[in-house]
Image: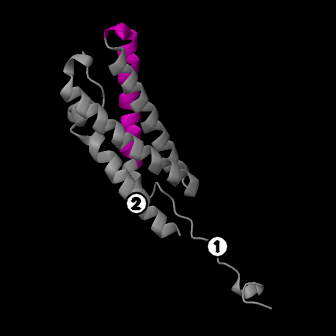
Amino acid sequence: MSDTDRPEVAEAPKQSFELGTGPGRVLVWFYGVFTVAAASRTIVEMVRGFDRAPLAYTLSAVAALVYGFITYSLVRGGEKARRAALVCCAAELIGVLIVGAWTLAEPAAFPDSTVWSDFGMGYLFIPVILPVTGMIWLRRARTVAV
């Protein structure tokens, strides 16, 4: 009989780790607020005149969806949700960097700003800080959960 066959040597259950606890609670709050802010802004802008700046308004809608998914993942918890949120935070950071650089390089393409314009300057640069903070927390959460 090997060590793995004995019941007393069986693997201990993994410690559960809630993503929305501790510092994760602050992330849930920020992502929740940004979900509501981006979605509200997008709805108002699209109703008032989508044809005025369709690219900017579509990008704001994408930001709202990303924020909403990350919020949901953080609240849901678990390893799959953690990995999904980590991928979304990375995609969000890439989006903020691309859109931020694009709005500076070609301002004419954006007659109206987006959540990610100028690297989130209209939102105190939180859109560029939030995904970095989220990725750090989600990486830490992995080391604690394993």
Q: Give the range drawn in magenta.
A: 28-52
In front: 18, or 52?
52
Q: Answer whether residue 133 is magenta in the image.
A: no
Q: Which residue is drawn at 30% across and 35% down?
A: 98
* Residue 38 percent coordinates (x, y): 37, 29
Which residue lies under the disc numbered 2?
A: 22
Disc 2 residue type? Gly
Give the image location of residue 94, x and y in percent.
35, 41
Answer yes or no: is residue 146 visible.
yes
> Is residue 89 depicted above or below 114 in this figure?
below
- The residue shown at (35%, 23%) is 41
SS for tag 2?
A: loop
Tell me if residue 30 is in the magenta stretch.
Answer: yes
Q: In which quarter of the image is residue 102?
A: top left
112 shown above or below 144: above
Left or right placement of residue 100 versus residue 44 in this view: left
Residue at the outermost right position? 1
Q: Mark 1 points at which residue?
A: 13
The percent coordinates of residue 139 (x first, y second) are 42, 60
Q: Which residue appears farthest toward the bottom when viewing the image?
A: 1
Which quadrant would residue 120 be assigned to in this image? top left
Which quadrant of the rendered structure holds the N terminus? bottom right
3 over 99 or under it: above or below:
below
> At 21% from the left edge and 32% from the top edge, which residue is drawn?
118
Residue 78 appears at what percent x and percent y?
57, 56
